[in-house]
Structure formats: C-alpha cells, structure tokens
Amino acid sequence: MPTDIPIAHVDIRPEDVEAVGRVLASGSLRQGKVVAEFEEAVAERVGAEHAVAVSSGTAALHLAYLALFEPGDEVIVPAFTFVATASMVMAAGARPILADIDPKTLTINVDHVRSLVTERTRGIAGVHLFGNACAIDELTNLAREAELTIVWDAAQALGTEYNGKDIGCLDRAVCYSFYPTKNITTGEGGMIVTPDGALAEKLCLLRSQGAERKYLHTVLGFNYRLTDFQAALGISQLARLNDYLAQRRRNASALSESLGRITWLACPTTLPGVRHSYNQYAIVLSEHVDHGVRDQVAERLRDAGVETAVHYPRPLHHQPFMAQERADLSVSQRVSERVLCLPIHPGIDDSAALRLAETAYETLSAIKL
Ligand SMILES: Cc1ncc(COP(=O)(O)O)c(C=O)c1O
C-alpha cells in the first residue's frame, strides 16, 4: 500500500535553483532577455511563430480576449472549466455564453456550441481541459463557417498533441499557465503563443502599460510582465518536459488499466488522434451511481494514503458572479457532481504508480453501491 501520495508535487532540482540564482545574482529582476529566451524556447517547443510571456494564465486569457474581441461580443465557453476561461471574457468587456461539455472527453460540446451561435458571436474558447485536447477540427471548421475566432485555453495542456502536432501551433491564440500544478512551472506565470505577428505585437503592448515606448501609452494596458528569474525557472523546467510528459502518460496507463475494470466509473477518454498530457487524471462516476459516492471514494482513498481533488465542484452557471438558470448544461452539472481527480504528477515513479493503481482499484472495488 502506498504511503502518502499527494495530489500535486513541485519538482525543483538543483539546476533550477542554480538557473534562478544566476539571474538573481545578475540583479536583473524584471522582464528582460531571459524572458525573451523563454518565449523563444516555448515557441520552438510547441511549433508557434510568436510567444508573449505574461504573469499568469489568467493574464494570458485576459490579453488574448482583449486583443481579439470588442466590448459586447459573445464568446462561447464551456460551463465546465476553470473560472478564468469565462471571467476573463467578462474582464475584456465581452459576454461569455456557456456551452455544455461532451460527457466522454469532458471538453466543449461542438454541437451545443453551434446551436448557441448568434449574430453577436465572435469567438469560442476551446479548453483542452485536464490536458485532453477538445474537438479541434470540428471547432476549427465551425469557426471558419461562422467567421469566429478561437482562443485556445491550454493552461493545463503544455505538451498535448493532436495528429502528431503540438496543440500550441493552432490559430489564433493559445494560452498557457505555468502555475505550480501545471506541466511545467515558473511559480505564477503564463504565455500566449500565436502564428499572428500583429497579434503578438498588440499583446506585448497590452502586457506592459500599453506603452509603445517609455511613457508613450498608445492603448490602455496593464503590468502583466513575467520576470527574468521566473523565466529562468521556466527554461530549466522546459528541458525536462518530455520526461514529465512520459511519466504522466505512464502513470495514466497504470491507473486506467486498473480502474478500467470498475464498471461504475469512466476513466479519461480522448478523441482519435489526441495525445493527452494528463495534467489531471479525472475519473467520473457513472450517472446511475448516487453522487454522494464521490465523497466516500475520496475518503477511502485518503485513508489509504492517496490524496484526491475535485476539479471542479460547480459548473460556471452556478458560480454566484455569473449565476444563471440553464437546463441545457446538464452534462456540466452532472460531471461537476461526479468528477474526482487522482494523483498523476511525475513525482510518482513507475513503481509508485503501480502501487497507486492497485490501491485505487482495491479501495474502489470494495465500495458497495
Ligand atoms: C483551464 C485553465 N484556464 C486558466 C487558468 C488560469 O491560470 P493561472 O492560474 O496561471 O492564472 C487555469 C489555472 O488553473 C486553468 O486550469
């Protein structure tokens, strides 16, 4: 039986400390050439033309929405996602319109998106939730037909691939987070990557007080800059991304092999061509099971030394700041009542993953429904 397996783990190695220390010792504590190197490294890694580093994934979404949409525009976002996917649409003066999710992939339901398009719709937020790519081709086709712009929320999806290509090479803006639970970390931090040079220029302006040059502010902007020492950590972590992804994927295989035998829950499912990066490993209890069983599962796993987390316990239409009655978001509602995330991070090595998978199977199969 495993000893304590936490839900998240931050992997800071001596080379990370050294890289950050070198920048600190240089006295350059602001955005400078190390941030530019980090942008270049991420752009190269994901196959994007341009990259703009910012202070968080939330800031990345805020700037992408601001740069691409006008006040009053409607942007369709999934109801089951982290709050910032929708709240930053509002912060940009646009209107988030909530769409339901697909019960298998837990990502936005494209048919529902199509039914929500109006003459005011200008965009879609395609969220690669938990590191699982959403229906990229279908969304792209719909966006082309209806002349919409897609902002991809890849906060949890650094390293996810679709048809052999990194999801970071997609049009028109792909937003990442480097928060400590993400696939690599800079502490707080984020990035927008894009094939569009003019958009990248606009994002750079917005990130730094809207200043074209010192004290000449051509647009209303912010201070959303990343610092050189955060970027140094990012560069150092990025060098290990392949190892991290490989471990996450092996851990997911071990869990799915065991938990796939339990009939009353669903393990993560991908669309054809998707290579999941497993930032989170989310199981969903089947709809025939009382949703109270989730607490029982979490409790029993905790007793067995396995920490779990609920991402996310409320769909966005039940968040007080944007509460609305929506009978058509039933999958988001059901999943938020039945989802449970298990540890999957690369701090779990192969032998710990096997023990985790066995413990999870034994614990869950002992539950009498
Ligand atoms: C899907 C999604 N979007 C956006 C964000 C926001 O990123 P950050 O926490 O870096 O602001 C997160 C962070 O958890 C996220 O999971």
Image (cartoon, grey):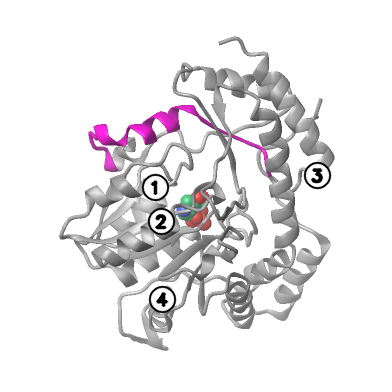
Badge 3: how crowded within 10 Å, few (<14), some, or many (20+)? some
* Amino acid type indicated by mark 3: Asp
Q: Amino acid at mark 4?
A: Leu
Relative to 211, residue 67 above or below: above
Q: CA distance from mark 3 to mark 2?
A: 31 Å
Whole-number angstrom distance, CA of label 2 to CA of label 1: 7 Å
Pick whichever of labels 3 and 4 is earlier in the sequence: 4
In front: mark 1 or mark 3?
A: 1
Look at label 1 and name its amino acid: Ile
Counting other residues with Cα less than 10 Å from the Cα at mark 4, is it few (<14), some (14-19), or many (20 or more)?
many
* Magenta stretch encompasses residue 151: no
Instruction: Estimate the x, y position of residue 301 in percent, counting from the top left.
Output: 67, 24
- Identify the residue position indicated by label 1 in the image: 108
Residue 233 image-quadrant placement? bottom right
Identify the residue position indicated by label 4 in the image: 203
Q: Which residues are magenta?
A: 322-344
- The residue at the far front in this view is 272
Mark closer to the chain start, 4 or 1: 1
Query: Which residue type does callout 2 highlight?
Result: Gly
Q: Which residue is mark 3?
A: 349
User: What is the x, y in percent for residue 153?
Assistant: 45, 58
Horizontal placement of 173 versus 311: left or right? left
> Which is closer to the viewer, label 4 or label 1?
1
Q: Is residue 301 above or below residue 119?
A: above
